């Protein structure tokens, strides 16, 4: 795994946790921010996957 894959998956997981906490507490802003962070992490992880495939 390259750095982009690791950081992306980490951000995706953190965003998911924030999103779920926002849902449980009824804080729409935190839920939204978690969703955005999750999406950004997914994009970075997918970029890392592509980078890994291209280097092979």
Image: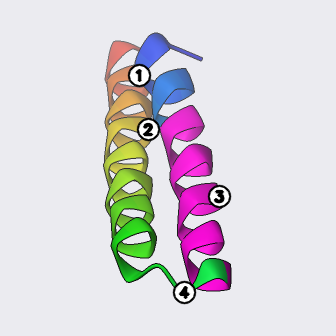
Nearer the observer, disc 3 or disc 1? 3
Rounded to the nearest whole Å, what is the CA distance between mark 4 and mark 3? 14 Å
Q: Which residue is drawn at 36% across and 13% down?
A: 55
Q: Residue at x 31, y 49 (%)?
A: 40
Q: Which residue is drawn at 44% across and 56% down?
A: 38
- Nearest to the observer: residue 19 or residue 50: 19
Provide the residue span drawn in magenta: 9-24
Residue 17 is one of the magenta-drawn residues: yes
**Residue position marked by numbered label 3 in the rendering:** 17
Rounded to the nearest whole Å, what is the CA distance between mark 1 and mark 2? 6 Å
**Residue position marked by numbered label 4 in the rendering:** 26
Mark 1 and 2 residues: CB-CB less than 8 Å, in contact?
Answer: yes
Mark 2 and 3 residues: CB-CB less than 8 Å, in contact?
Answer: no
- Which tag, 2 or 4, sits closer to the chain's start? 4
- Which tag, 4 or 3, sits closer to the chain's start? 3
| 10 Å crowding of disc 3: few (<14), some (14-19), many (20+) | some
Helix, strand or loop at mark 3: helix
Rounded to the nearest whole Å, what is the CA distance between mark 2 and mark 3? 17 Å
């Amino acid at each position: 795994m390259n750095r982009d894959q690791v950081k992306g998956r980490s951000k995706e997981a953190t965003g998911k946790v924030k999103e779920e906490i926002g849902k449980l507490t009824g804080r729409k802003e935190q839920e939204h921010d978690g969703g955005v962070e999750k999406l950004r992490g997914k994009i970075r992880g997918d970029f890392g996957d592509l980078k890994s495939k291209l280097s092979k």
